[in-house]
Image: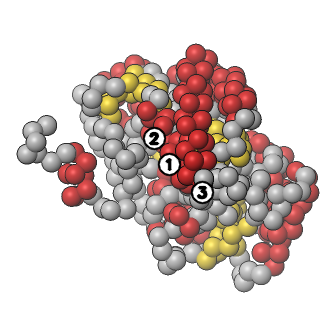
């Protein structure tokens, strides 16, 4: 770059919104990737433990997906849902069968936010109500309706809403008024809170929307069975359950293919939203719903970009690879080893309050010397991890949680490499935080 030319960062700031966040004091331009690694414009290699916000689910430059995209791109790029698309039908058949929802119908979108929008439209139309239950600390996307059911003030830029949203307890196990209870008592208390909230509603409630593991919220999760207990309350009232699987779907948690399956005692959800990982970087989202719910719309509807030939070809190739190589099993095995390694590291570090998660969906909550949430520590750790050659994410209501979500093909050696880089980053962070507190 010539000294007279502005940097890419400066050009970005000149034309992009101020609220469009960038990681790092010196933001990265990533130019290419392979497997679990990416390279920046300066040629430095990084181990990627965030995958474009859990989107590069399988691997960077996966040959099977690249081949499917390129072969379809030279045939036809776009048609819209006004025409039959073989790839779309085939992918819908597979997703419907995998969803666990009986008599399932599938509608494809171009993003998780649009999937949330669609699920809310279906639920409110089917129930003829704009009242929706959502979880505290939740995140469901960036559109007007998605923000309206997001229970995280850091991601809610407006109080205006097309919905009446009521927030209930349960998604954050280790903080809040019920944190001291046993798992069983916690579930009982949250069910009582849900019943109390329902007793204060006027008219018909449309649905509960919930992430089985909260993503942006810091990879927090309730005890297994909470949403099954909720469903025992909701189902007799006809209230639908929307499981937001945008981050938990496709086997990332290791124990289950879908996050809702940790809460399966009362049956599958009525609607399920998905996105991110199924496209391995291509823009795919969607909704699965019982036919009765999916078919309730009485007006015309199409999708211009949802279910495009190229993205559907990519999704089919990616899903085939994931299933044939048992990446859910790999997430369970390698993720379990990684979590235990990180917990051993954290045991001697006061800056770490908790290591939590399942499979390859792991959160590390950081605190200051007084035990309060420390977004400063998370920002430092993000920078130190980058310097150690590791890319990670962050989240949580206070911005104090490190988020780890590597591609599901992560090897044991790469997990150990990432853990070593995190150990270095966390030790440096803890030392800096302690020094900053000295008088």
Residue under label 2: 383
Task: Give the CA separation, mark 2 to mark 3.
Answer: 25 Å
Nearer mark to the viewer, of 1 and 3: 3
- Vertical position of residue 322 compared to residue 29: above or below: above
* Marks 2 and 1 close (CB-CB < 8 Å): yes
- Vertical position of residue 266 compared to residue 128: above or below: above
Dot 2 lies on which element?
helix
Q: Residue furthest bottom?
A: 202
Residue under label 1: 379
Q: Out of 338 and 270, give the one closest to the viewer.
A: 338
Residue 393 percent location from the top left of the image: 51, 43
Q: How is the image coloured?
A: secondary structure
Task: Give the CA separation, mark 2 to mark 1.
Answer: 6 Å
Residue under label 3: 439
The residue sitting at 50% across, 78% down in the picture is 160
Q: Residue furthest top?
A: 413
The residue sitting at 39% across, 54% down in the picture is 21
């Amino acid at each position: 770059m010539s000294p007279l030319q502005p940097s890419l960062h400066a050009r970005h700031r000149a034309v992009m919104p101020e609220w469009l966040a960038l990681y790092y004091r010196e933001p990265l331009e990533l130019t290419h990737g392979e497997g679990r690694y990416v390279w920046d414009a300066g040629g430095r290699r990084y181990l990627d433990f965030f995958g474009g916000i859990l989107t590069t689910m399988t691997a960077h430059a996966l040959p099977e997906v690249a081949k499917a995209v390129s072969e379809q791109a030279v045939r036809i790029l776009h048609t819209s849902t006004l025409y039959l698309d073989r790839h779309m039908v085939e992918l819908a058949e597979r997703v419907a069968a995998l969803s666990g929802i009986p008599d399932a119908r599938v509608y494809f979108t171009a993003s998780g936010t649009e999937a949330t929008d669609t699920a809310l439209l279906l639920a409110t139309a089917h129930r003829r109500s704009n009242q929706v239950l959502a979880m505290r600390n939740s995140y469901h996307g960036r559109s007007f309706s998605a923000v309206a059911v997001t229970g995280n003030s850091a991601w809610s830029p407006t109080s205006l809403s097309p919905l009446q949203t009521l927030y209930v307890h349960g998604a954050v196990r280790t903080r809040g008024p019920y944190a001291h209870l046993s798992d069983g008592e916690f579930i009982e208390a949250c069910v009582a809170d849900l019943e109390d909230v329902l007793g204060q509603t006027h008219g018909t409630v449309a649905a509960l929307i919930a992430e089985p593991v909260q993503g942006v919220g810091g990879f927090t999760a309730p005890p297994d069975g909470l949403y099954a207990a909720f469903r025992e309350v909701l189902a007799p009232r006809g209230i639908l359950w929307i499981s937001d699987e945008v981050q938990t779907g496709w086997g990332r948690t290791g124990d289950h293919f879908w996050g809702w399956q940790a809460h399966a005692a009362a049956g599958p959800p009525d609607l399920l939203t998905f996105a991110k990982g199924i496209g391995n970087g291509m823009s795919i989202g969607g909704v699965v719903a019982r036919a009765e719910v999916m078919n309730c719309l009485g007006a015309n509807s199409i999708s211009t970009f949802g279910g495009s030939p190229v993205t559907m070809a990519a999704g089919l190739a990616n899903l085939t690879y994931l299933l044939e190589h048992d990446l859910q099993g790999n997430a369970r095995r390698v993720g379990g080893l990684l979590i235990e390694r990180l917990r051993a590291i954290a045991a001697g570090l006061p800056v770490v309050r908790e290591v939590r998660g399942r499979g390859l969906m792991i959160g590390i909550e950081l605190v200051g010397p007084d035990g309060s949430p420390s977004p400063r520590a998370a920002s430092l750790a993000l920078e130190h991890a980058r310097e150690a050659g590791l890319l990670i994410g962050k989240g949580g209501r206070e911005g104090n949680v490190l988020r780890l979500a590597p591609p599901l093909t992560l090897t044991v050696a790469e997990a150990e490499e990432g853990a070593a880089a995190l150990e270095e980053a966390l030790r440096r962070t803890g030392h800096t935080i302690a020094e900053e507190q000295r008088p």
